[in-house]
Amino acid sequence: MKRLFFLSSALFLFLLIPSEKAYAICQMCDGNNTLDAMCVTLGPCDRWATMGACVVMERYDSNGEVTSRYCDSMGSRPSVNCNGNSPTCTGQGTECNIGWFDECPAECLLCWIQSDPWS
Amino acid sequence: MVVTLRVLIVWSLAQLASCAGTFCNALERPLFPARMTNLGRTADVDVMVGFELLEADEWLLVGTAEKSRVLLRFSENDGLRPLANIRAQSVGEGSGVDGDAWWYAIAGGLGNQWGAMFLQEQEPQSRIVPLPFAGTSRFVAVRGGSARGLYLYVDPHDGATRAIEVTPDGIQHRWDLAGRDLLTTAEFLMAVRREDESIALLVGEAERVTLKVLAANAAPGEFVLSEEPGFRYAAAANRREELLLVSESANRLRAIHVDLAKPDRIETIWLTGEQERSRFPTVAETDDGFVVAWIGGETQLRARTIAHGRLALLPMNVGPITRRGERRPFVAVRPSGDSLVFVWERGDDIVARTLPASSSGVALLTSVEARLCDRKRH
């Protein structure tokens, strides 16, 4: 009975742990080694994911306060689904001109914002 | 005799009060008033990360938003207006002024490319220079002169740390750097172009600061500037090839003054005492030395000048500052003629204050003004 309990618990835990594919995520670090370091979750069509999991770790000064932060990948790598590998992804890299109140479209890498209409 | 003396004292005090009244009436407004510009209404910016003074009343500001950077221009006539929005997965960025024109550089993931993007005021289009992709990489703008950056990366093929000098025209030079862990332990990187066109790269770690001199077709030279514990570094170099590196050391600010032509001659200057905690230093070069700004006692922005290697007698109070969360507060200072322009973040506002370039003079004058005039104004 005891053995059955342990076996079913182990099976339950095994099912609970997600496979890498099911929970594939694409992460990169913005501002690594600064106070503003943060993990950025990228969409499947974004490129340059460097890790699959990302945790922000902190370094401290002599008063115990944060001096800088860095991203720890915990040894993970980005999944094969990351970095624009899906055929549905379209290219990015256009330079666009937009109006004062317009959003920069997703396909534009750089948007130059034109002077405001009242000036 | 006693009566005469009393009359004389009363008369002297009356004269002094009368003088103070004339002095305060002449001032009418507080000395060197601060100016506030609301940022929240103009641009969706999370954190300000860059500032350049173009003319006395024109600035370039760089802010971060979600997965993008926003370039803004401020002028007294037009107020704050957005210039450009860049989608980038940044490993570093920076800006500079060449003559009167600004430039901005950012490196990392730029759409389908990995490289460095340069935006220049006098160029209608951006330029992207492809760089070797590396999971561990950093980029710093090279201060002094035209648009230029230094890309540092751990080569995934052999694990070596390399540096590439890059300009809008392409890759200029490459170097192999000593220290395999350099990019994971460095908390501070700063690069400045020297007169002989070499690059001085400053690397700040928790208990060590090194200066690397990167010259064309030569192995990098290396000098250890400090092996003392230091945090939250800031640095600047001036036209006289002097470098000032400031760091927090316990609760005080320590500066290391270095002549780049003789980097083994190092002078240590203590900028603040132990009477209040001094944090988050910012440094800028001036014509005759440097100015250092910092947060004193958690709520006051203070500054002190160093002219011809001499520390000003007194620090000046620039204004009140509030820090949002655990972020590094945005503070910038730049020289403008005989004045210093301080710009800092306060809530949704950007506050600017122009003060004379002598911190001791400002400290004395504002102290006299506060003592004589505050009671009269209220």
Image: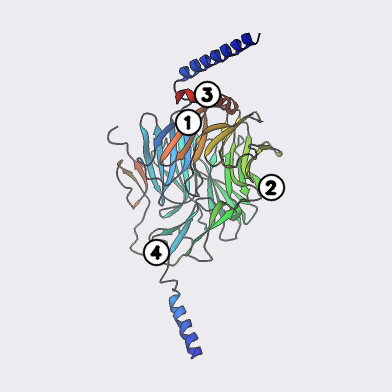
- Residue B139 falls left or right of residue B39: right
Quote the CA–CA distance across marks 3 and 1. 17 Å
Quote the CA–CA distance across marks 3 and 2. 41 Å
Quote the CA–CA distance across marks 4 and 1. 50 Å
Marks 4 and 2: which is nearer the front?
A: 2
The residue under label 2 is: B228
To the question of a shared chain for discs 4 and 3, the answer is no
Q: Quadrant of the C terminus of chain A?
A: top left
Q: Chain of mark 4?
A: A
The residue under label 3 is: B369
Q: Residue B191, labelled with which disc? A: none
Along the line of sight, the residue nearer the viewer: B264 or B289: B289
Q: Residue A85, labelled with which disc? A: 4
Task: Residue A52: give x, y in percent of width and height.
Answer: 47, 65
Q: Chain of mark 3?
A: B
Quote the CA–CA distance across marks 4 and 3. 66 Å
The residue under label 1 is: B353
Q: Give the amino acid at mark 3.
A: Glu
